[in-house]
Image (cartoon, rainbow, N blue to C red):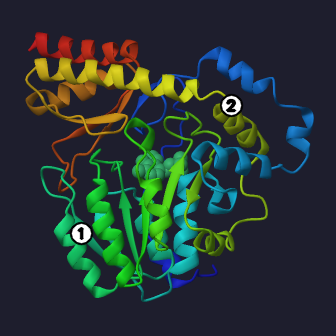
């Protein structure tokens, strides 16, 4: 067999479950719960034509529309197949073998993969046990003059937010060291959008966002990066011939023209999250709600029984057994109250059986 280059040969990738998750209540990967509203879905379908499939995509109108909705020029945006691809593009653009990359961990797992693929030396800065952002250790790590710093806010594992003042301190210190800061904001819509205001000041900051979470388009694979024009221009050098597919273009344009849809997704999800947090706490469980569309809970003595019951009821959650920070925690994606009621009832039933 022909052996790949060392950075590929030495990667350890986790196996993906290959069975369909469609028939489950999917609370394991922070997608939109449950499905799209049928009327909204039909609205998108109505805008597709046979040419949507046969012609190469017309991506430009989406750049313009997205720029207008964010209040930034289209020249500061880059679209791609999920925020995942944009994270990859940042590494492919800036990271060379031997460069140091600092990651505040735990974080989105593909940061590590794309850094390694580009031959980086990874310096992990851990979050503390209370899930708070490690500001001082991150600032200290910048003294090594790393090439890149990978952050997420809200964090996709813990739900923790980096405050605007902490972010400003970090990006400013990074700028002095010529370090690029990549800020993954996949869960932005569940909190406040404050980072855009930093962009005019910093030429070393890339914001990476997605339509997969509050937008509910995880299956269509569309995300975007925002940065100053020159920086985004460099990242655009590594884009494929066409950034995203035409069905994704149509669906995103629909969402941007109907901003109430995402607002409703967020409202329903946060109401359901409040319900579930309350019900789990009423059972004496420790819950960290975080600022995204999921919560972390210690199921404690009931863990095995509750996880078994979830499985029997076709509910998928993310068990984190074996993880040094999160071994005792289970991550549950939040959705509307009806779905969260299903989860709460399963937990109540297990506990009342003793
Ligand atoms: C924190 C975080 N970033 C990025 C992603 C990737 O999302 P996508 O590629 O679907 O935009 C995820 C997906 O779970 C995530 O949790």
Residue 257 circle label: 2
Of residues 179 and 39, the one nearer the viewer is: 179
Whether residue 56 sits left or right of residue 187 in the image: it is right
- Quadrant housing the N terminus: bottom right
| SS at badge 2 | helix
Decide: is 153 above or below 90. Answer: above
* Badge 2 residue CB within 8 Å of ligand 1: no
Sequence order check, earlier mark of 2 and 1? 1
- Mark 2 neighbour density, 10 Å: few (under 14) some (14–19) many (20 or more): few
Q: Position of residue 265 (x, y in %)?
A: 49, 25
Whether residue 87 sits left or right of residue 285 in the image: it is right
Whether residue 274 sits left or right of residue 45 in the image: it is left
Of residues 5 and 263, the one nearer the viewer is: 263
Residue 125 circle label: 1
Q: Nearer the viewer, mark 2 or mark 1?
A: 2
Q: Position of residue 269 (x, y in %)?
A: 40, 25
- Quadrant housing the C terminus: top left
| SS at badge 1 | strand
* Residue contact at pointers 2 and 1, CB within 8 angstroms: no
Decide: is 259 above or below 209. Answer: above
Residue displayed at 35% across by 38% down: 292
Q: CA distance from mark 2 to mark 1?
A: 40 Å
Residue displayed at 51% across by 79% down: 118
Q: Position of residue 257 (x, y in %)?
A: 68, 31
Q: Position of residue 216 (x, y in %)?
A: 55, 33
- Mark 1 neighbour density, 10 Å: few (under 14) some (14–19) many (20 or more): some
- Is residue 59 something one can see in this rendering? no
């Amino acid at each position: 067999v022909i052996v790949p280059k060392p950075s590929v040969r030495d990667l350890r990738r986790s196996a993906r479950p290959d069975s369909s998750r469609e028939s489950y209540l999917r609370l394991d990967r922070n997608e939109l719960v449950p499905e799209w509203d049928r009327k909204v879905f039909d609205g998108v379908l109505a805008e597709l034509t046979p040419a949507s499939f046969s012609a190469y995509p017309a991506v430009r109108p989406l750049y313009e529309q997205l720029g207008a909705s964010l209040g930034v020029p289209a020249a500061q945006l880059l679209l791609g197949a999920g925020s995942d691809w944009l994270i990859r593009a940042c590494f492919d653009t800036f990271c060379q073998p031997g460069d140091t990359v600092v990651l505040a961990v735990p974080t989105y797992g593909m940061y590590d993969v794309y850094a390694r693929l580009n031959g980086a030396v990874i310096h992990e800065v851990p979050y503390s046990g209370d899930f708070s952002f490690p500001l001082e250790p991150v600032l200290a790590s910048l003294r090594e003059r790393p090439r890149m710093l990978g952050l997420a806010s809200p964090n996709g594992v813990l739900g923790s937010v980096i405050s605007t003042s902490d972010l400003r301190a970090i990006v400013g210190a990074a700028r002095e060291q010529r370090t690029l800061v990549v800020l993954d904001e996949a869960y932005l819509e569940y909190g406040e959008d404050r980072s855009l205001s930093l962009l005019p000041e910093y030429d070393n900051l890339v914001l990476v966002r997605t339509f997969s979470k509050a937008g509910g388009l995880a299956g269509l694979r569309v995300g975007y990066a925002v940065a100053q024009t020159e920086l985004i221009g460099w990242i655009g050098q590594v884009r494929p011939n066409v950034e995203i597919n035409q069905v994704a273009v149509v669906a995103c344009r629909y969402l941007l023209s109907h901003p109430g849809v995402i607002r409703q997704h967020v409202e329903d999800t946060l109401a359901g999250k409040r319900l579930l947090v309350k019900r789990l706490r009423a059972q004496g469980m420790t819950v960290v709600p975080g600022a995204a569309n999921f919560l972390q809970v210690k199921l404690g003595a009931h863990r095995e029984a509750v996880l078994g019951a979830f499985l029997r009821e076709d509910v998928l959650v993310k068990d984190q057994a074996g993880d040094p920070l999160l071994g005792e925690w289970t991550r549950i994606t939040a959705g509307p109250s009806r779905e969260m009621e299903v989860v709460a009832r399963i937990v109540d039933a297990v506990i009342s059986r003793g």
